[in-house]
Amino acid sequence: MKFKGVIFDLDGTLVDSLEDLADSMNTVLHNFNFPVHALKTYKYFVGKGIFQLVRVALPESRRDKQTIARCHKLMMEVYGNNCTNKSKPYEGIIDLLNELKSREIKLGVLSNKANELTTRIVYALLPDYFDVVKGLVIEANKKPDPSEAFQMSETLGIDPADFIFIGDTSIDMQTAKNAGMYGVGVSWGFRPKEELIANGAKCILDQPMDLLKLL
């Protein structure tokens, strides 16, 4: 099959953002005198948006609506000011994007991170590569809901079946399946290969340039 477009997840797929997310969330937790978490723990907290990250990072006894709202507001401020401090594209991503652009493949980013943060990170770290970039605007459309993937398909004028959807979590693989796109997992992200395969990954990339074998 000749694919015409590729949609990427952001965190754990294009960009290693874990330290900035962990540092920011731990700053919020410290500010409220709550226990902080180790960096590796955040691999299992991320993927469902900042609001969900805040909720699961809080102590179970303090996950009431008021506390979550206050911590979420501060997290958006802290992370918004620090979201590109340590974050960087994974090794090989720039080479892959350059090759895809040279082949005139349409490229998109779809993240469960808030839209303002998604666009800020992409345009700071990976400018001029993507035809469409979309983060979370409407909670009901959060991945694995396929609504935004369908909208990207329409915007780019490409049938969903002609897209590769690349991500590092079960959420991404479920999104690909729900949208009728070809789901591809990556081994360098935040979740193990087993999770990706169990959730429908057609194949797993061990390095970015491996994608070219599908094209």
Image: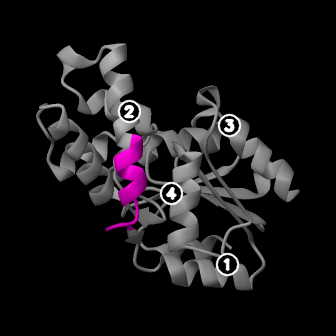
Read off the residue under disc 1.
100
Q: What is the span of residues highlighted in magenta in the rendered image?
A: 76-87
Q: Which badge, 2 or 4, is on the more N-terminal residue?
A: 4
The residue sitting at 51% across, 52% down in the picture is 117
Q: Is residue 81 above or below residue 97?
A: above
Q: Is residue 212 above or below residue 19?
A: below
What whole-number distance in Å separates the C-alpha atoms at marks 3 and 4? 16 Å
Q: Give the residue type that dot 4 points to.
A: Leu
Q: Which badge, 3 or 4, is on the more N-terminal residue?
A: 4
Read off the residue under disc 3.
146
Between 58 and 198, the one nearer to me in the picture:
58
Q: Which numbered marker is on residue 51?
A: none
The residue sitting at 41% across, 72% down in the picture is 90
Q: Which badge, 2 or 1, is on the more N-terminal residue?
A: 2
Image position of 90 (left or right of 132)? left
Tell me where residue 97 sits by quadrant: bottom right
Q: Is residue 162 visible?
A: yes
What whole-number distance in Å separates the C-alpha atoms at marks 2 and 3? 25 Å
Please state, as top left, top right, bottom left or bottom right, where the N terminus lies in the image.
bottom right
Q: Is residue 47 magenta?
A: no
Q: Which numbered marker is on residue 72?
A: 2
Read off the residue under disc 4.
10
Q: Nearer the viewer, mark 2 or mark 3?
A: 2
Q: Nearer the viewer, mark 3 or mark 4?
A: 4
In the rendering, at what x and y percent does residue 63 appear?
28, 18
Report crowding for label 1: few under 14, some 14 to 19, many 20 or more residues within 10 A (C-alpha).
many
Q: Nearer the viewer, mark 2 or mark 4?
A: 2
Q: Is residue 85 magenta?
A: yes
Helix, strand or loop for disc 4 = loop
Between 128 and 147, the one nearer to me in the picture:
128
Q: Give the residue type that dot 1 points to.
A: Leu
Tell me where residue 60 sits by quadrant: top left
